[in-house]
Amino acid sequence: MASTSTSTSIASKKYIPHLRHNDTVKYPHVFTSPNTTFIPEPYIFDVVDLQPLADGRFGHINCFLWPQLYSRKHQWSGCIFRHEQFVEDDVMKWLWFTPTETDARQEPSCVFELGLLEKKLCNALEKPFNKAAGCVANAQKSVRTDAQKDLAVHIQAASHGLQRLQCLPLPARDMILQVAEFQRILLDTFAIVQYETIALPSQPSSDQFRLSNSRWMGVFTADPATAQELYDICIPFWYICLEETFPLKTNIHLVQEFVPRPLATSLHAMLKYGES
């Protein structure tokens, strides 16, 4: 298990290398990971009201922008794509595009300030939708029944979202929220496909080092059994334990600082929805 002593690992009949790639302390917790080369700054201890911000995101608690606590109900969430891995991808980069009010094309005969997203941007967002639809079609026969249903619902919701952006005039800020929701649905769709077709088929390994898939977001967990599962299927994870329970037999490879969120994203998160 990710942060346990040798005796505990043997008792559980499981094995994860005890040489850590990194270790970070945020009193009174210790964060370790055997399958990543960094530890993201955790925003998981405070209760935060879920509300859209100026860019349509949810700030530090947005699971599509930053790792969150593992959820058994949403097992695929660790496979959500990381933005920084797709900045040069002409199709996928649009899943993190943030429109502004200037990207709304006003309806000329409308007495209200309603408009549509610029056609060139709608066309750009259609590209990742088509890619997701293709991935879903290819995966439907090989994934579990529940996942088949989830994927069908997701791709239908994304289709309706794209149609609204193309055909339904909206106030500019509602348009921004609609774009963010469309992007979230597609990121969730890709995550389910990745989890079902790549993560789950992975076989447990006794290799001394087994790095995770660098394209995936990853999760935090305080459960040793969950840590073992995530390690076996190559999902990035960061194991949390109290300093007083940190095993003395753990070998630390590197002690480092938390990786903070990108500055641009943090600035967006500081702008409350409705503010100029």
Image (tube, helix red, strand yellow):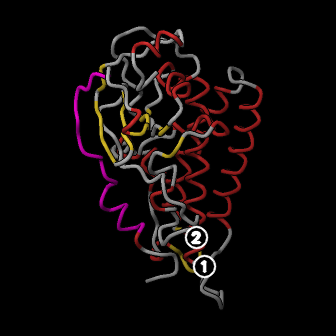
Q: Residue at x 55, y 28 (%)?
A: 226
x, y percentage for residue 251? Answer: 27, 22
- The part of the chain drawn in magenta is 250-269
Q: Residue furthest front?
A: 244
Residue under numbered circle 1:
171
Residue 118 vs residue 51, the one in the foreground: 51
Q: Provide the secondary structure element on which disc 1 rests.
A: loop
User: Marks 1 and 2: CB-CB under 8 Å?
Assistant: yes
Residue 217 vs residue 34, the one in the foreground: 34
Q: Is residue 226 above or below residue 191?
A: above
Q: Label 2 sits on what residue type? A: Met
Quadrant in the picture for residue 34? top left
Q: Quadrant of the C terminus?
A: bottom left
Q: Label 1 sits on what residue type? A: Pro
Crowding near the residue tagged with mark 2, few <14, some 14–19, many ≥20 C-alpha atoms within 10 Å: many
x, y percentage for residue 211? Answer: 36, 23
x, y percentage for residue 232? Answer: 50, 18
Residue under numbered circle 2:
175
